[in-house]
Amino acid sequence: METIERKKVKELLSQKPGQEVLAKGWVRTKRGNKNVAFIALNDGSTINNIQVVADVAKFDEDLLKRITTGACIAVRGNLVESLGSGQAVEIQASSIEIYGEADPNTYPLQKKGHTLEFLRTIAHLRPRTNTFGAVLRIRHAMAFAIHKYFNDKGFVYLHTPIITASDCEGAGDMFQVTTLDMDNPPRLENGQIDYSQDFFGRHTSLTVSGQLEGELGAMALGEIYTFGPTFRAENSNTPRHLAEFWMIEPEMAFYDINDNMTLAEDFIKSLVQYALDNCMDDLKFLNDMFDKELIARLESVVKTEFVRLTYTEGIRILEASGEKFEFPVSWGVDLQSEHERYLVEKHFGRPVIMTDYPKDIKAFYMKQNDDGKTVRGMDVLFPKIGEIIGGSERESSLEKLEARINELGMSHDTLEWYLDTRRFGAAPHSGFGLGFERLLLFVTGMGNIRDVIPFPRTPKNAEF
Ligand code: 4AD
Ligand code: MG
């Protein structure tokens, strides 16, 4: 037989009938009777399957038997108009080759729907489900849209390091990186571990944020963004926290907090619009399966102006709400997601950008307001998610920044290089960090952050 080019299912489904085609993929289901077998084939290119019709009389009985859910096959045949409903075309098979069988007695993904919890225990196989196919294609589309958005605006993609000696957020929840022998580490005379003998000659960790290096980039290239994995060893077992998550951090010279808010709002809206324009098949599936309001919510967000509100005003609204919160509110407390969601979902009914937080609940680098109490931070709060973006205008005065570092008892040693940006050609600047998986929670409507990343890392879980 002469060879022909394999086409992806997505392409085949939009082609005209009446041509010989070659498709390859994994069997989702097989049904039929003694005359004909119907095989639903999926290759990951789309949520939709292509139907393969095999005339039982034309095929070896044993071969057909080995084609079960999960098996990988190559099908050659005629693309014909489909008589069944649900698809325009199907493949009338002339030959089928089995690449890999999947024993029906042990293959964990059977026809019946599985719970998301069960699928997490087989994270290596769950991309073969409709749900994870849809989520992972949307995840890809969003990553692409992020690069496109910043590239179109002239931002430079800056690769910031994953291993670092500084703690950007000052929260101390970092994963240590070391090659020292943990059973017998070298010690100083006072008994402390001697990190000068460690691989980097100092104490190092996985980064919680690329911001500090991002700021150096902005002070040279003007507008940069990072997009990479970040790590937090906070013991938060919630549907919104991962120990390893991806963050997008734009950093812009000459932006004040208002410019920063305007960019953040435009950025998120553009990403949601990109999903609506490019991922509708997958969104429709998720809308039907999990969240009947998903598409309506996405369409509404791109049209809605976000509320801009100070922390102090927010606290006033929460205090006046009469709502019974698990964590009581008063000026100075860090907002919990129940508070954020009250403001967004109940009080305003749209996304909120909250600014001017008490300095004691925010990181050292935020620009200090003249009141001596608050800093020019901003959080973007979203329905169902709570905080999706955290950012700020940065403190550009060396004097004020050093004073804050001292006040917090932070070490200067690991930050001297950062302070140089304030010593030499300091400029007003701002930036923010968007949690990629938090964005994906919103765009896919999934309820648990473990279900929007291929291989979640959470407390007590680093399998696969
Ligand atoms: O608010 P965060 O901690 O801000 C920063 O790290 C700044 N350095 C960003 C900047 O200004 N360049 O984190 C930013 C965002 C949060 O709003 C949230 O969306 C996400 O990162 N995030 C997490 N996502 C998943 N799991 C976690 N454990 C997360 N912690 C933060
Ligand atoms: Mg934050």
Image: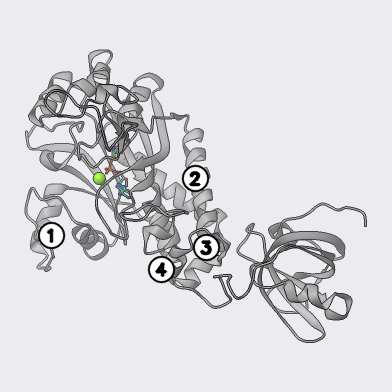
- Occupied quadrant, residue 40: bottom right
- Occupied quadrant, residue 348: bottom left
Under mark 2, the amino acid is: Ala
The residue sitting at the bottom extreme is: 34
Asked if disc 2 is less than 8 Å from ligand 1, the answer is no
Marks 1 and 3, Cα distance to the nearest angstrom?
41 Å
Q: Earlier in the sequence, mark 4 or mark 3?
A: 4
Instruction: Give the label, 1 or 3, closer to the camera.
Output: 3
Instruction: Give the label, 1 or 4, closer to the camera.
Output: 4
- Tell me which residue sits at (43%, 60%) in the image: 451
Under mark 4, the amino acid is: Glu
| Colour logic | one colour
Taking the image in four quarters, ligand 2 sits in the one at top left
Q: Earlier in the sequence, mark 1 or mark 2?
A: 2
- Tell me which residue sits at (23%, 42%) in the image: 173
Under mark 1, the amino acid is: Leu
Which disc number belongs to residue 117? Answer: 4
Give SS at disc 2. Answer: helix
Image-based side of 120 in relation to 235, left or right:
right
From the viewer's side, name the closer residue of 464 and 443: 464
- Occupied quadrant, residue 460: bottom left
Q: Earlier in the sequence, mark 1 or mark 4?
A: 4
Q: Earlier in the sequence, mark 1 or mark 3?
A: 3
Instruction: Give the label, 4 or 2, closer to the camera.
Output: 4
The residue where tag 2 is placed is: 143
Q: Are marks 1 and 4 in contact (CB under 8 Å)?
A: no
Marks 4 and 2, Cα distance to the nearest angstrom?
25 Å
Q: Earlier in the sequence, mark 3 or mark 2?
A: 3
Which disc number belongs to residue 318? Answer: 1
The residue where tag 3 is placed is: 126
